[in-house]
Amino acid sequence: MAIGIGGGFGAQHFFQIWSGELFPTKLRSTAQGLMFAVVRIGLGFWSFFVPIITATGFQTLAYILTAFIVISGVIGVVWGPKTEGLTLEEIEQEQGWAT
């Protein structure tokens, strides 16, 4: 159930979908590539600490991961782009990228 709830505003949407909407079309693939790199490096760094955290109990890790999902959701709701129902041209004009 938590995956179903968190999937809508999970971290993947930040670096895969929203980064695509937050950059002009000419820079979109570069932005997504950069975000994939940042996320994968961050995940690698985080992976060093998972064994230490689980040594204190799995419940601690579950609380931390739940907190990450909640923080991700708050960031998405508050600062995510409001582009529902807009065409790509309207988004580019709104962001000031229209040529």
Image (cartoon, helix red, strand yellow):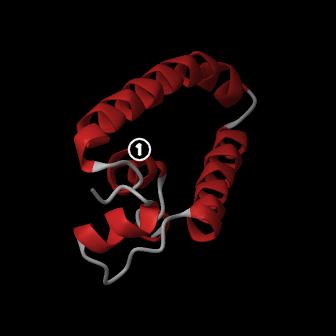
Q: Is residue 13 left or right of residue 51?
A: left
| Left or right of 85 on screen, residue 72 | right
| Element under disc 1 | helix
Amino acid under label 1?
Phe
Give the residue pinned by disc 1: 15
Quarter of the image with the N terminus in it = bottom left
Residue 65 appears left or right of 97 = right
User: Residue 95 at what x, y percent from top left?
Assistant: 44, 61
Residue 13's x, y, as percent?
A: 40, 54
Residue 24 image point, x, y percent: 32, 49
Q: Give the residue furthest to the front.
A: 99
Name the residue rendered at 36%, 31% in the picture. Answer: 36
Instruction: Pick whichever, 32 or 61, lies toward us.
Output: 32
* Residue at image location 48% in from the left, 49% down from the top: 11
Q: Position of residue 86 (x, y in %)?
A: 31, 79
Q: In the rendered image of this protein, does residue 64 appear above or below residue 85?
A: above
Q: Residue at x 69, y 53 (%)?
A: 67
